[in-house]
Image (cartoon, rainbow, N blue to C red):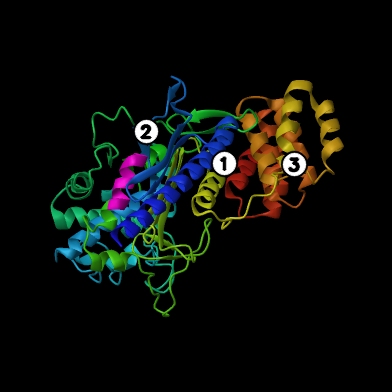
């Protein structure tokens, strides 16, 4: 009997090894294609339990220095940071230092929303205004403002914004709630949030390369985040140099709790294993975190999302399917995409980290899942149509308006291979304008008004180009038309008033 059992175990292991090898080959083929097409720039790791089935580094950690990503590359993981904030709160609850149904104002006495509980913040059911709504007006008034967690409660008091709904009645993703939770962790533990994460989560889990941004002097393995600078050129710039995302990458960079954890693919696997073995949190509260939150109506919070139907627990998305018992979270912030998926039933872990907002990131995540599970759970993406406006602008810059018009007229009816989008053409025109390609910008934005005559925004943008080109009278006509179509265009109305007052 023992021999039979040994033979069965050996056979099972051989089958598993064969499957792992096949999956590794398929994953390698996938990432070869993504790498060649520059549709992925970062690290991928797939594991079965503590065994790494596939790991690969693609692209560059620092592009200017041509420094490549490696297995030690550390990425800002964006909103996946929320899982650590939730864990910190749950650890304190397990120690009896707080209760999940305690009111937040008990720990932050100046907070005026007295019905909010810790559980509401953990489950995204608070109804609080989010960081953009709360801080953008302050940043617009003071472009040098550095927002900190300590500014949140005073800003909430000053804004006097009512909750969007009764706490617990609806689900709406909210970053401010997790920033408040980080303040609660500090108040209850007596430690800085960075020190708490290090002492109670990262060190116990063996996550030696993980830390809160700004808390480590030696962070030479931290990669730079990149995004597209000019869509018409396809070039990349670092988030630190980008004006487009300055409010996130500079003004609100210091907010912690909802974001700002830095980690590696290997460390994130250690995190998954520590959760499985209850090394960081006991079974009872772990199970509660991984159970769908019930709204006051009795219905589960079901936000769904890009990766299929999902409920939400306490700090975690909970995918709904028949393939396993999944918990996951994604992260997106300027320059970075993160995908962290763990199957508690089969102990499979999928981790993808990207530092260039790569266009193929979502596809890479879904195809990795399909390969690992041997399924087409995520259907194959149809052949992508190409943008017609991108090559149009390329011809416009290189060959002039007549050649560009000829190109556009030749392909505008080919909806099988090309798509057109108002927002894209408008943004391309404004990018040309920002780079002082005035004539090309005028042509592109004029075309936008002709193709989308019912959009007030097209006339506003064309007016801006006319004004920059010294065509004041025509600019007044465009701004007037824009404001007539949409009286809420307050910036346009102000410019029009200034122009007509002269």
User: Outermost residue, top direction?
Assistant: 65
- The residue pinned by badge 3 equals 448
User: Outermost residue, bottom direction?
Assistant: 297
The image shows residue 337, relative to residue 288, as above or below, that is: above
The stretch in magenta equals: 263-273
The image shows residue 268, relative to residue 347, as above or below, that is: above
| Residue 71 numbered mark, or none | 2
Number of the front mark, 2 or 3: 2
Tell me if mark 2 has few (under 14), some (14-19) or many (20+) residues whose alpha carbon lies within 10 angstroms of its own: some
Tell me if mark 3 has few (under 14), some (14-19) or many (20+) residues whose alpha carbon lies within 10 angstroms of its own: many
Instruction: State whether residue 117 appears in this view.
Output: yes
- 285 and 65: which is toward the camera: 285
Q: Quadrant of residue 393?
A: top right
The image shows residue 292, relative to residue 435, as above or below, that is: below
Tell me the element at label 2: loop
Tell me the element at label 3: helix
Measure the alpha-carbon separation of dots 1 and 2: 20 Å
Give yes or no for residue 284 being in the magenta stretch. Answer: no
């Amino acid at each position: 009997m023992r021999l039979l059992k040994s033979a069965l175990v050996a056979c099972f292991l051989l089958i598993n090894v064969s499957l792992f090898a096949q999956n590794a080959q398929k994953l390698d083929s996938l990432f070869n294609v993504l790498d060649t097409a520059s549709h992925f720039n970062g690290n991928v790791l797939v594991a079965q339990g503590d065994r790494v089935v596939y790991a690969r580094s693609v692209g560059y950690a620092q592009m200017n220095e041509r420094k490549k990503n490696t297995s030690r590359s550390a990425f800002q993981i964006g909103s996946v940071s929320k899982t650590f904030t939730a864990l910190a709160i749950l650890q304190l609850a397990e120690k009896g230092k707080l209760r999940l149904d305690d009111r937040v104002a008990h720990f932050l006495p100046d907070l005026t929303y007295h019905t909010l509980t810790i559980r509401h913040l953990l489950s995204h059911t608070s109804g609080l205004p989010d960081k953009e709504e709360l801080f953008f007006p302050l940043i617009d008034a003071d472009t040098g403002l550095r927002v900190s967690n300590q500014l949140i409660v005073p800003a909430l008091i000053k804004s006097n914004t009512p909750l969007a709904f009764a706490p617990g009645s609806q689900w709406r993703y909210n970053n401010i709630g997790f920033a408040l939770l980080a303040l609660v962790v500090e108040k209850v533990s007596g430690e800085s949030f960075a020190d708490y994460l290090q002492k109670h989560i990262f060190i116990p889990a063996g996550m030696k390369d993980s830390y809160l941004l700004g808390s480590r002097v030696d962070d030479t393995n931290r990669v730079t985040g990149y995004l597209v600078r000019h869509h018409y050129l396809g070039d990349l710039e670092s988030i630190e140099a980008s004006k487009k995302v300055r409010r996130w990458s500079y003004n609100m960079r210091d907010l912690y709790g909802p974001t700002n954890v830095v980690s590696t693919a290997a460390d994130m696997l250690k995190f998954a294993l520590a959760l499985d073995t209850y090394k960081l949190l006991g079974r009872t509260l772990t199970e509660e975190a991984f159970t769908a939150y019930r709204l006051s109506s009795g219905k589960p919070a079901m936000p769904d999302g890009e990766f299929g139907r999902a409920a939400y627990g306490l700090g975690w998305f909970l995918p709904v399917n028949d393939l396993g018992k999944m918990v996951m979270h994604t992260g997106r912030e300027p320059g970075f995409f993160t995908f962290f998926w763990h199957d508690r039933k089969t102990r499979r872990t999928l981790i993808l980290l990207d530092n260039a907002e790569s266009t193929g990131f979502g596809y890479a995540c879904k195809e990795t899942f399909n390969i690992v599970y041997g399924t087409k759970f995520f259907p194959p993406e149809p052949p992508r149509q190409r943008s017609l406006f991108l090559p149009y602008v390329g011809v416009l810059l290189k060959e002039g308006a007549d050649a560009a018009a000829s190109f556009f007229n030749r392909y505008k009816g080919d909806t099988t291979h090309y798509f057109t989008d108002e927002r894209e053409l408008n943004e391309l025109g404004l990018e040309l304008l920002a780079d002082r390609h005035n004539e090309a910008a005028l042509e592109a934005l004029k075309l936008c008004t002709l193709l989308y005559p019912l959009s007030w925004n097209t006339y506003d943008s064309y007016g801006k180009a006319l004004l920059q080109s010294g065509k004041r009278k025509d600019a007044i006509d465009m701004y007037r038309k824009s404001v007539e179509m949409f009286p809420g265009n307050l910036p346009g109305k102000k410019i029009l008033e200034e122009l007509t007052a002269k």
